[in-house]
Amino acid sequence: MPGAIYPDLRDKTVLVTGGGSGIGEAVLRRFAAQGARAAFIDIQEDQSRSLAAEIAKAGGQVHFEAADLTDTTALRAAISRVRDRFGAIQILVNNAAHDERHPTLDVTPEYWDQRSAVNLKHQFFAAQAVLPDMIAARSGSIINFGSTSWMIGQGGMAAYTAAKSAVIGLTRSLARDFGPYNVRVNAIAPGWIMTERQVSLWLTPESEKELMQRQCLKRRLMPDEIASATLFLASEEASACTNQQYIVDGGWV
């Protein structure tokens, strides 16, 4: 697989949430190609088991746990099983999210809470679950995925953009609190990345025309480009990088 090689990632235990498809799948594949112990949690069981089997057949160290990340008890149990399989978790990639559109006037309190759970809450509790491993090792990297949607003032999904803007506050707080243990915490804000889901649901000739007008780079951005940034932040090449948000959007913002 193309891309830089980071020798320090070999045999490290990495956990990717939402690693069964889209950006998360690209991240998982790249970590496995580095020789890391690549674990992932996803709610899509059939697709995820096929992905894990494919990576394992290619010689990768991979482990899949099926869980609904909005169920904190299930999330904690899944992380515990990853630890039992691969040992202490050294890198956490909080990738899972869902950018479902929603008219503001139709949002109920229950829907708001559910959007927060799927886009923000699990990031905190996944970090909480792995931080004891990192504190004990006095080393670790947590990478929280945000979004540029709130930066560009995108409408039609206020609960999503509110949750994604909060990722920065979570990232900076964790970086400050756990920096003394040499735990680095950063965020990545992807732009419009052309996953299969984005192309099938949202990409139209009109929206792509607007995208090409707004981006500095006049081309589609792909999941593997987010994976490249993720690997760098997870590696020791980024040993002095923490408390930051890295925008990977082709120059839209």
Image (tube, grey):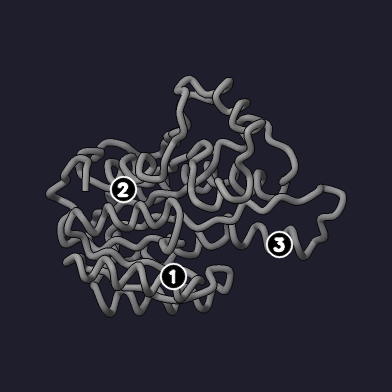
Residue 112 in the image, given as x and y percentages of width and height = 74, 58
Q: Name the residue under label 2.
A: 180
Left or right of 3, for residue 196: right
Of all residues, the one furthest to the right in this rendering is 105
Mark 2 in CB contact with mark 3 (< 8 angstroms)? no
- Residue 40 x %, y %: 37, 66
Residue occupying image coordinates x 27% and y 69%: 62
Can residue 253 be seen here? Answer: no
Label 3 CA crowd tier, 10 Å (few <14, some 14–19, many 20+): few
Mark positioned earlier in the residue sequence (2 or 3): 3
Q: In which quarter of the image is the C terminus?
A: top right
| Numbered badge on residue 47 | 1
Of circles 1 and 3, which is in front? 1
Amino acid identity at mark 1 = Gln
**Mark 1: few/some/many CA within 10 Å (<14, 14-19, 20+):** few
Residue located beneath label 3 in the image: 113
Amino acid at pointer 3:
Asp
Residues 194 and 246: in front is 194
Q: Which of the pair 51/153 is nearer the observer?
A: 51
Q: Which amino acid does label 2 sit on?
A: Pro
Of the residues tagged 2 and 3, which is closer to the observer? 3
Q: Residue furthest front?
A: 205
